[in-house]
Amino acid sequence: MPVGPGATRGSGGVTRATAVLGGAFLVVMTAIVTWGLATGAYGWSPGSLGTLRALGRQPGFANLVRALTLIRSQYVGQPNMSKVYAGAISGAVRALNDPYSTYFSPRAYAELTSNASGRYSGIGVQVEAGAGGEPVVLQVFPGSPAATTRYVGEAQAGAPGLRPGDRLLSVGGMAVRGLSLPQVAARILGPAGTPVVLRVARTLGDGRVEDLTFSFVRRPVTIVTVAARMLPGRVGYLDISGFNAQTPAEVAVALSRLTAAGMTGLVLDLRNNPGGVLDAAIETGAFFLPPGTVTSLQGRTGRQTYVLRSTRRIAVPFVVLVNRYTASAAEVLAGAIEDDHAAPLVGQRTFGKGVVQRVFPLSGGAGLRLTVAQYYTPKGRDLNGRGLEPDLVVPSPPSVGDYGQPARDPQLAAALALLARVAKRAA
């Protein structure tokens, strides 16, 4: 390979001056970190100094420091070291080979925080990592652009919008296979009033795959996670599409209204619910479970048990609907209900996401979501990769527009039949 003027052939070694510079950089970095530990400037405890020393004894850590030193001192341009450090963190997280652990840039972290609060600007869709490397739609928020926009060339007949299970192929003309979820979200989210084009692959009931293009206009989206109405026979229908900070209060209002209207039974719909804030799911459990253990988490530092001390449990029989997109915190709630025999589960085996992530803020507005524990049902069942098997297995509705419609939703129809048998026995 040709070598340019002024360069020398060799094995990639560095000069003595570079080595000295690298050593000085390491000394300075160590001093800065030690100062941060001593003063608490980084949010670390003095006990973390032992962890830092242990890292320093690892050959890989020395290589990391040396690589950063070489980039800073030898790279031909003037590198933006803040971006280099962020890239190092992102690469370290990717090396875990865990689809749920993610580094968030300041912008992505701000968006994550707003999503947890229930408000953001975008199209109203939630995606999760797919097995084939393409993000998969898990949830479409009612009334959002994602739920109301027809694909390009679609006739007016049929239900518009994205559907759970749609695979994202590209956003804004850029392929998304292999991108992290924050990278995908950064392309979908944006200022209200701006356009964004998504191309998706949709698998139909007969196995055919359609390649569809949607042209959305972003707008402010408030994530309302609870929808409720009364079905014939005074059976309440409560659909929880996800768990955020507002969900328990929304559930309380919905159940109060259904009870005031004379509800005699309830269908709790957790289908297509990808989870969300674990504490919100546990608090929601107070309406469906007696006092006791809801779940336990096993992490590196031991086991943590979540217990309901008091409840506001509903006084009518209920049935829980689940499917293969019921995941994470939704599985925590459904698993506790199943272990307690509080209600039967109807539908399909759930997703099987039995690991819990914690979000850690980093300096400069960035953040790190890291898998920190595995959860277990009250009876100690491990659901990760397995999911929950419903008491009654029933196929899904043929299309997303059929969900919640008793005449076209076989899972809901089966739940209503179960409630009718319970009412008949009680009579």
Image (cartoon, grey):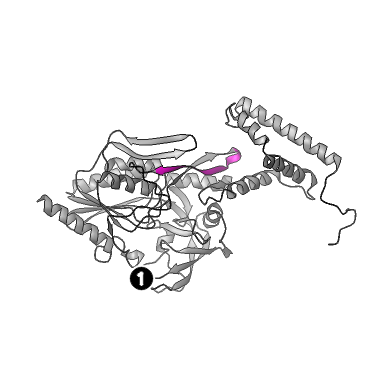
Image-quadrant location for residue 37: top right
Q: Is residue 360 left or right of residue 56?
A: left
Residue 26 visible in this rendered orientation of the protein:
yes
Q: Name the residue under label 1.
A: 158
| Number of marks present in the image shown | 1
Q: Residue at x 34, y 56 (%)?
A: 271
Image: magenta residue range: 363-375
Question: Vertically, is 65 above or below 344?
Answer: above
- Decide which of 35, 221 is in the foreground and name it: 35
Q: Which amino acid does label 1 sit on?
A: Gly
Residue 209 in the image: state x and y as whole percent.
45, 72
- Decide which of 248, 371 is in the foreground and name it: 371
Q: Is residue 284 left or right of residue 60?
A: left
Residue 279 lies in the magenta stretch: no
- Decide which of 322, 80 is in the foreground and name it: 322
| Helix, strand or loop for disc 1 | loop
Quadrant where the N terminus sits is bottom right
Residue 188 in the image: state x and y as whole percent.
52, 57
Residue 2 in the image: state x and y as whole percent.
86, 61
